Amino acid sequence: MSSPAPELLRVQWRDEAMECRDGIKLISRVWQPAGQGPWPVLLMRQPYGRAIASTVTYAHPSWYAAHGFLVVVQDVRGQGASQGKFQGFEQELSDGADTIRWVRKLAGSNGRVGCYGFSYQGLTQLLSDDPAAIPDCLAPAMTGLDERSDWACEGGAHWWALGLGWGLQLAAMRCQKLGDDAGWQAIRRSLDSRDFLAEGLDLLKRHDPQGMACRWLQLPASEAPRWVCHQPDPALWQRPMLLIGGWYDPHLRGILNLFSLAKAAGGSPLLRIGAYTHLDWNGGLDRLQLAFFQHHLQDQAAAEELSVAVLLEKDPHAYGKQSSRHWRAPNSAGSPLSWGLGSSGLATIDAEEGELLLDQFGSGEVALVHDPWRPVPGRGGHLGLDPGPCERGDLDCRGDVICFTSSPLSATLELEGRPVLTVAVRADQPSFDLCATLSVLDIQGRVLQLSTGVARTQQPAGEKSLLQVQLQPLLAELGPGERLRLSLAGAAWPQIAVNPGDGREPLGPAGPLHRVITLEIELADSQLQLLPLLDSKFGPH
């Protein structure tokens, strides 16, 4: 094992206090390079403890400091050692602006500031109530502006397992700060045993009733006006921006939206999307991020990896294969791919009977019965507790899953974009869920999941409607002999709560009042399309 670089060993750290405009003190840890300085600042503002510094996805702050940056990781209000009451994103507008002003004048700072961080730390970079107090450049990862669609819900359904898991993590931190050891232990036991999937909302109400997750889970997932969508200062879109997303991250649409907003405002953001989950970035992107900050804060020449605006990493979609690390500019040419759906009515019983017809119209009808006693599991993907690619052949063999499969490909087919399914459906109950999955059947016969989506619907029983299901954006390559499959089910437990069928908001697993739901799908009016990943007016470069 090689020894650490001398510069890394010479990095020193200290804790600093900052006073907000209302007198509350926020605590930051500062890593300072060797030498006299001054240096540009890299700032991360997060709620999980400044010593951790998001090292689950990033290199330790001392690594960045060893490259000539003063690195500041701050405990946000009410978290870690910082004073005040933690209120989530609403507090970050004023505290973010105060912090930018403070780090510009911090001992050792040369006044230039870049921000980095993912998830909560990604959104804090974008929030400020003072146009004069925004970073000089920023690198938001795995984040978004809309608390409903980017943080809590999809297709009219709450993120059940993910939302509860994250909320209970914050609730446990609150118990720790209050000295409530029993509350912390109760949350830990529930998470370890997975009992939180049934009792998690009650735990949140007991231990963090004003927390974001508890509030979100009690808001209707389908009513956008009741949710907050943050609006960054217009000047921020002109700042150099490195946006990082993952094909298996629930915030991917938020990152794509940030790219579109910045481009529409005249900015020049860089976009990088890889086969990443929320916490696993396949070896990290620290070299890329360092090159970005060196260019914009240290005036170094732009590295080659910064020369292309949009770079996407393909999903290898197969077990045992390492990521190809093949980066490319997306192809926006050509019309969207589309498939019709065909079946003689046996596509639930026989996984091979339903047809996925490229550039053709489908025909037939299929009935699907959702039994709440044995709801179809959600597996992997971007909303799973086990995120990422997975094998789902056993799920497709169930009698409550409809499968439509293409003919074997005669040539390579690249799938890039946003899959959207339009389905003509009638139900015998006033509410139901439709959960869609795209998979590839490889030449070994494995069913490898690529993308998932959900739509939660309320409509009069027996009334036909055209329902749209938006699946997770994807980039994957299918080879000759492989087949594409679309699978439909009435549940994806515990990724989303099981629908009771009576119009009530689903809030957990199935119970004695849950109804059996029968869906009738008319295939002639149903279609799967693959829409462009990015607005075509932006172009591939």
Image (spheres, grey):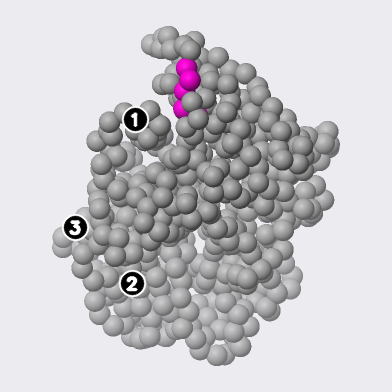
Question: Where is residue 529 drawn, in percent x and y?
Answer: 33, 72
Q: Residue 258 is drawn in which quadrant?
A: bottom left
Q: Nearer the viewer, residue 442 or 533?
A: 533
Provide the residue span drawn in magenta: 37-41
In front: mark 2 or mark 1? Answer: 1
Of mark 3 and mark 2, the one earlier in the sequence is: 3
Q: Is residue 167 above or below residue 320?
A: below
Dot 3 surroundings within 10 Å: few (below 14), some, or many (20 or more)?
A: few
In front: mark 3 or mark 1? Answer: 1
**Residue at figure coordinates x 60%, y 70% from the top left:** 224
Question: Where is residue 32 drawn, in percent x and y?
Answer: 53, 18
Q: Are marks 2 and 1 in contact (CB under 8 Å)?
A: no
Cα distance between the residues tagged 2 and 1:
44 Å
Residue that numbered label 2 is attached to:
529
In front: mark 3 or mark 2? Answer: 2
Residue that numbered label 3 is attached to:
412
Disc sitting over residue 219 in the figure: none
**Residue at figure coordinates x 43%, y 21% from the top left:** 68
Q: Is residue 538 magenta?
A: no
User: Callout 2, which amino acid?
Assistant: Gln
